Amino acid sequence: MLKKDISFRHMRLDKKNIIVTAAAQGIGRATALKFANEGAKVLATDINEDKLNDLKNENKSIQTMKLDSTNKKDVETFCSSVDKIDVLFHAVGFVHHGTILDCDEDEFARSINVNIFSAYLMTYNLLPKMLKEKKGNIVIVSSAASNVKGVPNRFIYGTTKAALNGFVKAIAIDHIKDGIRCNAILPGTVETPSWEGRVNMADDPVKARSDFIARQAMGRLAQPEEIASLATYLASDESDFVTGTLNLIDGGWTL
Ligand SMILES: NC(=O)c1ccc[n+]([C@@H]2O[C@H](COP(=O)([O-])OP(=O)(O)OC[C@H]3O[C@@H](n4cnc5c(N)ncnc54)[C@H](O)[C@@H]3O)[C@@H](O)[C@H]2O)c1
């Protein structure tokens, strides 16, 4: 039997304090909006202040703050100002294009920094606040391109996302008795501004776009709002029994 009646809850994230990173566009933005619509008190962060302002204009209840999730000092200052947190939704990530031979030391370090160190920094600084409450929930945006699927020209991206999958399981097992849950979302290809950018950078953007779509078993890409729906489930009490999981949402790409 469920501890509380969650079956017909209207506002699925009512009064939850949620920090969203990479909230200025794409998956993070759609998720911040969905969380707010489900009753959460959202604190949306990103390095892009202009686009954070656009988000705030779309939903005035969302608080925004400029934050580089890879900057140790800034993250420490930001987290020390956080009073209460129920959920961390961490979506910061960068897609490097190429094989190992296209990835020099600087590119390697950049992807480790943006994709892994940011998750470490945010979690390292916010987890103690959750432990104090004996309740907390961390959702990390990883990728199907990881230990789940080898994707051509995604050497360091797939490597870092595989590491994040290990990160999620490690946090989940270490703190399972402390009331902390930690799960990953593994999207396939999502139609976001950065995806548009990757398509437009190709020699033949029209072909690149149709190639991306052709590799999708469903014949279409995901929309950011579809990832936000899964995020809402994982952030809510509906998923109270779910921890350490890698949640594929890829339209059958990895079948
Ligand atoms: N789009 C896809 O097809 C896809 C697929 C699988 C996984 N993902 C993952 O989803 C996440 C979001 O991707 P997206 O495509 O929705 O977003 P995006 O790439 O369009 O936007 C990323 C956002 O992150 C912000 N950002 C970048 N570096 C930052 C930093 N250091 N600190 C704070 N903010 C920073 C940017 O300003 C931007 O607003 C990423 O982790 C990505 O790897 C995306």
Image: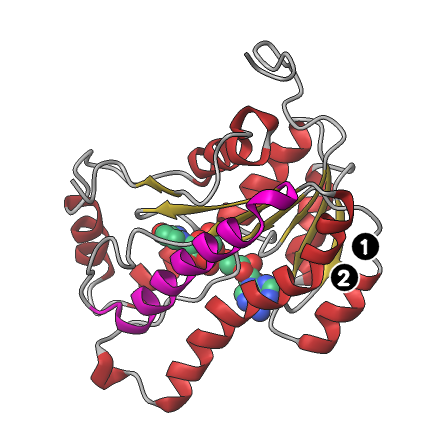
- State whether label 1 is within 8 Å of ligand 1: no
Residue visible at 32% across and 68% down in the picture? 159
Residue visible at 78% across and 38% down in the picture? 60
Mark 2 Cα-neighbour bin, 10 Å: few <14, some 14–19, many ≥20? many
Q: Which residue is labeled 2 in the image? A: 79
* Quadrant placement of the N terminus: top right
Image quadrant where residue 248 sits: top left
Q: Residue furthest front?
A: 177
Q: Main secondary structure of the magenta part?
A: helix
Q: Which residue is labeled 1 in the image? A: 82
Image quadrant where residue 74 sits: bottom right
- Dot 1 lies on which element? loop
**Image disc number at residue 140:** none
In this rendering, the answer to whether 244 lies above or below 197 is above
In this rendering, the answer to whether 20 lies above or below 122 is above
Image quadrant where residue 151 sits: bottom left
Name the amino acid type tagged 1: Val
User: Residue 9: horizontal and vertical position, in percent?
Assistant: 63, 14
Q: Which residues are magenta?
A: 153-179
**Residues at marks 2 and 1, CA–CA distance in whole angstroms:** 5 Å
User: Residue 197: horizontal and vertical position, in percent?
Assistant: 38, 61
